[in-house]
Image: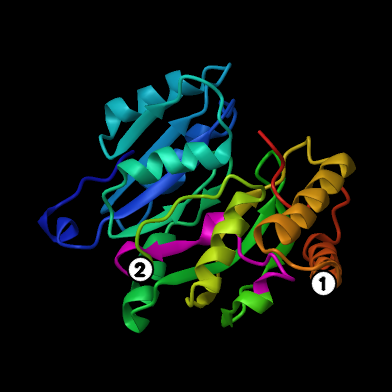
Amino acid sequence: MAKKENNQNINLPLVSIITPSYNCSSFIEETIQSVQIQSYCHWEMLIVDDKSEDNSVDIIKQNIEKDQRIKLISLTKNMGAAEARNAALKEAKGDYIAFLDSDDLWLPTKLEEQVAFMQRGNLAFTFTSYCLIDEQGRDMNIEVQAPDKISYKDLIGNTVIGCLTVMLDRHQVGKIQMPNIQPEDTALWLQLLRGGHQAYGLQKVLSRYRIVSNSTSRNKLKAAFRYWRLLRNQEKLNIVKANFYFSKYAFNAYNKNRGNSSTSLLKGDE
């Protein structure tokens, strides 16, 4: 059931939630519901359908009829998650930007606690701890803990920032878009940190990251290759530095996902 906004809510900063969607009919309604039950009600949810071949769009439209804070953007051809997020970023009206993929979930106080965290410190870039769930939504007893803060040199060797946990202050970071290189979310975080920002961690689990059945060892290899290419092509690291940071990345990714052999290092391709 959608919560109704009142005048007090409308005076709060608006949070724009960016959700790319592709063939997500099994999960998208639960994801939407995890936004609707937020204790913080002043949000807009921009769902970008990336030319799905299932009935995702029908489900999204049914939810829009009940809650006009949800908006649908439909792409005319499949463009990938980066372009889907960028389409939403162009339409976003919020003071803050938050990211939530179509199969992930937020805990009910996520927005309220993170907005307050950002306002207390006048922070531009924050993220939180999160936990892993399986395809059926069951807790896998694995948590990824957010450090107090993370710099460019920290992040380049440790992809600890979960996209579903990030919130950005648009007034401080300015106009942003996801780079067209995978992993596009980490590529954006590195750009922001390289530009002088630091990312601050809220050390509380407020999001649930879903591991789906196609997260095979082949996807792990693809994710590793993508990260190597990011280090070399976007970050322009020489072979020695790339090897050093890639080794740190692989070690930390293994530790982050230990206990579940099907977990990919990063979210798989659409």
Query: Residue 31 in the image: x percent, y percent?
Result: 50, 41
Residue assigned mark 1: 248
Residue found 44% across the figure and 18% down from its top: 58
Left or right of 234, for residue 66:
left
Q: Secondary structure at mark 2?
A: helix
Query: Residue 176 in the image: x percent, y percent?
Result: 42, 55
Q: Secondary structure at mark 1?
A: helix
Image quadrant in which the C terminus is located: top right
- Whether residue 157 appears in magenta in the rendering, the answer is yes
Residue 110 in view of the camera: yes
Residue assigned mark 2: 115
Left or right of 245, for residue 127:
left
Q: Nearer the viewer, residue 77 or 234?
A: 234
The answer to whether residue 261 is above or below residue 123 is above
Magenta highlight range: 155-172
Front position among marks 2 and 1: 1
Q: Residue furthest left?
A: 7
Q: Amino acid at mark 2?
A: Val
Q: Residues within 10 Å of mark 2 (few under 14, many from 20)?
A: many
Residue found 57% across the figure and 34% down from its top: 27
- Whether residue 30 appears in magenta in the rendering, the answer is no
Q: Quadrant of residue 159 in the image?
A: bottom right
Query: Residue 93 in the image: x percent, y percent?
Result: 26, 49
Image quadrant in which the N terminus is located: top left
The answer to whether residue 151 is above or below residue 183 is below
Q: Nearer the viewer, residue 226 or 74?
A: 226
